[in-house]
Amino acid sequence: MPSTDEFTGWLGYDAQSVNGNLKKGTFNPKIFTDDDIDIEISHCGMCASDLHTLRSGWGATPYPVVVGHEIIGKVIKKGANVTQFELGDRVGVGAQCYSCLEADCHECTSDNEAYCPEAVFTYAMTYANGDMSYGGYAKTGRYPASFAFKIPEALTSEVAAPMMCGGITVYSPLKRNGAGPGKTVGIVGIGGLGHFGILFAKALGAEKVYGISRNTSKEADVKALGAEGIIATSEPGWASKWNRKFDLIVSTANNSDMPLHDYLAVLKTGGRFVQVGLPESPIPSLQFRPLINRNLHIVGSLLGSRSEIAEMLELSATQGVKSWIKTYPMEDVNEVLLLMEANKARYRFVLAN
Ligand code: NDP
Ligand code: ZN
């Protein structure tokens, strides 16, 4: 049974909601427990996952839904078991809001909370008791405190918001797959996640970082983000030119017609290809030969662990990593959705209450 409390948010009622058809209204959040906090939301970043979900692109969405999982705000209520926050603290919540955190959970005890069989994501999912999870396109949010994070003073709320999902989703695989000194790293897809890919690969000390984009239109941005340059996949022969140059590629491409075999061709022997973008349809085919001939590793990666989120925020604060954002009033969310659908973000839109 959800709570009878009424929170105000921007709700999607059907697949048309992605076309700028969210409706402002109220919803009943999860029941408040001793482990929860209520957050007065000040900012919420817009992730491509919000659009996939609104249009039921990944399967039927349980409407009505409130999307948004790059949430920053102030703690305005806390349960009896919540000792890590005080009322008024500025916190962030990302795309995951619950995992079991039990001592006998393989995932939760190995820094892999995102893969916990009981994981609940911040919107469009149900908690064990059947309550729905609701995201951050709202005035208020209610989440288990264990998946909220203090935001370092040095980061403004606008800058921190998109790090909560877009940032951590590339930070974690970069870190886990060895982006660092001596390594050449490629980031496929220069969007919200991709721009963080360049920023964090550099912050982690990767020797050379390249943006791998469909064309050269983002070249100046890619360089300003710190990369050595851009590689355009529309250029004939690009994969031969860059043959065996990369130790690691993190791909944020979110359409299944990506040139996967070309991406694999530019990896060194033993190289790693990490896919984080989640297209709505399957990739057309995958040949094993390039994997076998070069001992390549293809892996997927989901979000990041709680310790990695804290580490990413700290690193961003100390190294001055800044998200590239444009902030709009939350009231204008429907217009901003259309801009996002039209690929206008450079590189993240943030909604502000
Ligand atoms: P954006 O729309 O901001 O960026 C996606 C980028 O992908 C585009 O900018 C484009 O870059 C590239 N792209 C688009 N179509 C193609 C194509 N056909 N071939 C190659 N590249 C393409 O989205 P986000 O960065 O917000 O999200 C990216 C994906 O990651 C989404 O699917 C999202 O749901 C998913 N995601 C996954 C998470 C996880 O835990 N694994 C967490 C969060 C999001 P360019 O113009 O440079 O080619
Ligand atoms: Zn996201």
Image (tube, rainbow, N blue to C red):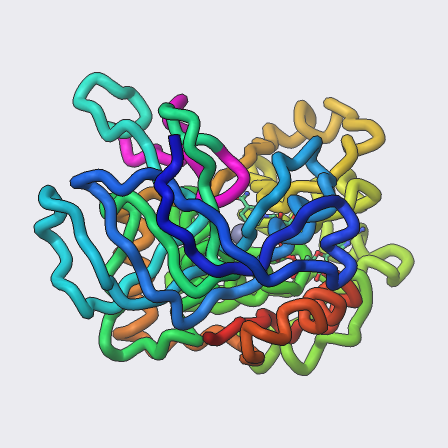
The kind of secondary structure the magenta stretch mainly shows is: loop
Does 120 appear in magenta?
A: yes
Give the vertical position of 234 relative to 63 (above or below): below
Q: Confirm whether residue 269 shows in the render.
A: yes
Position in image of residue 281 (x %, y %): 78, 34
Query: If the picture is divided into quarters, which one holds ligand 1?
Result: bottom right
Q: Which residues are magenta?
A: 110-125
Give the vertical position of 94 relative to 224 (above or below): above
Position in image of residue 246 (x %, y %): 60, 51
Position in image of residue 129 (x %, y %): 36, 25
State the image quarter where residue 334 is shown: bottom right
Residue at the extreme top: 104
State the image quarter where residue 118 is shown: top left
Position in image of residue 1 (x %, y %): 38, 30
Determine whether, in the image, residue 171 is placed left or right of residue 258: left
Residue at the extreme front: 4
Residue at 36% from the left image edge and 49% from the top image edge? 5
Determine whether, in the image, residue 69 is placed left or right of residue 81: right
Residue at 64% from the left image edge and 31% from the top image edge? 294
Q: Confirm whether residue 201 shows in the render.
A: no
